[in-house]
Amino acid sequence: MVPANTPMVTFEAGQYSVPHTLLGETVWVRVHGLGADEQVIIVHVGDHGPVEVARHARATPGTPKIDDTHFPPQPEGALERRPRARTAAEAEFLDLGEGARLWLVEAAAAGTSRMRVKMTEALALAKLFDPVDVDWALGHAAVHARFAHGDLASILDHHPSRERPVSTGPARTPR
């Protein structure tokens, strides 16, 4: 029996995909051949008699045999994820722009530690420098998987288009 929610069937401890149009339907599974030529053949008996609906090499436990065409197309926007702010600080961070959003998604996917601290540091940098440059640096960090402490400041420091901050400390004279 094909489950009602996933177009996969289990046969002799292996899993095999079938067309999604067969969700909830009964199929018959058999083996053809031996050794390396062994194949699992899946048949559905419909209005016009038995029809082969899938043919796979033998699967082993934990390594299912999947044909991507057996799955329905994803709905429009199904894979687009937009982070939502839960606090004022998160909202302020996301307001920096698309680079901040990308950084947040990629940093979370990479399992980055101390993300809130790094977000706070980014907001502090946005008060010192042009927020557009900080957003650019966050996007750059996300694309290049640079989520370590100090990476954002390093990227910002080497951003070619931004002006260097003017020092307000005492002037030094060479000896």
Image (cartoon, helix red, strand yellow):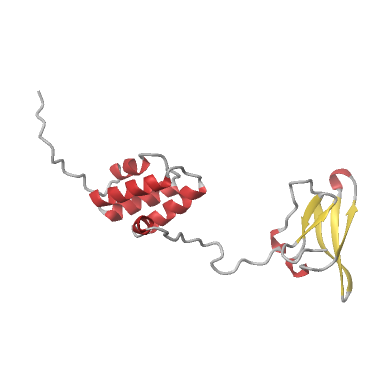
Image-based side of 125 in relation to 50, left or right: left
Placement of 84 over or under 64, stated as above or below: below
Residue at 83% across, 63% down: 1
In the image, 92 versus 21, the foreground residue is 92
Residue at 56% across, 69% down: 76
Instruction: For residue 129, say whether it is visible.
Output: no
Quarter of the image containing the C terminus?
top left
Placement of 80 over or under 119, stated as above or below: below
Residue 100 percent across, percent down from the top left = 38, 54
Residue 89 percent across, percent down from the top left = 35, 55
In the image, 91 versus 131, the foreground residue is 91
Residue 93 percent across, percent down from the top left = 35, 55
Instruction: For residue 13, say whether it is visible.
Output: yes
Rendered image quadrant of residue 19: bottom right
Image-based side of 69 in relation to 113, left or right: right
Placement of 125 over or under 94, stated as above or below: above
Placement of 151 over or under 139, stated as above or below: above
Residue at 80% across, 54% down: 56
Residue at 37% across, 45% down: 117
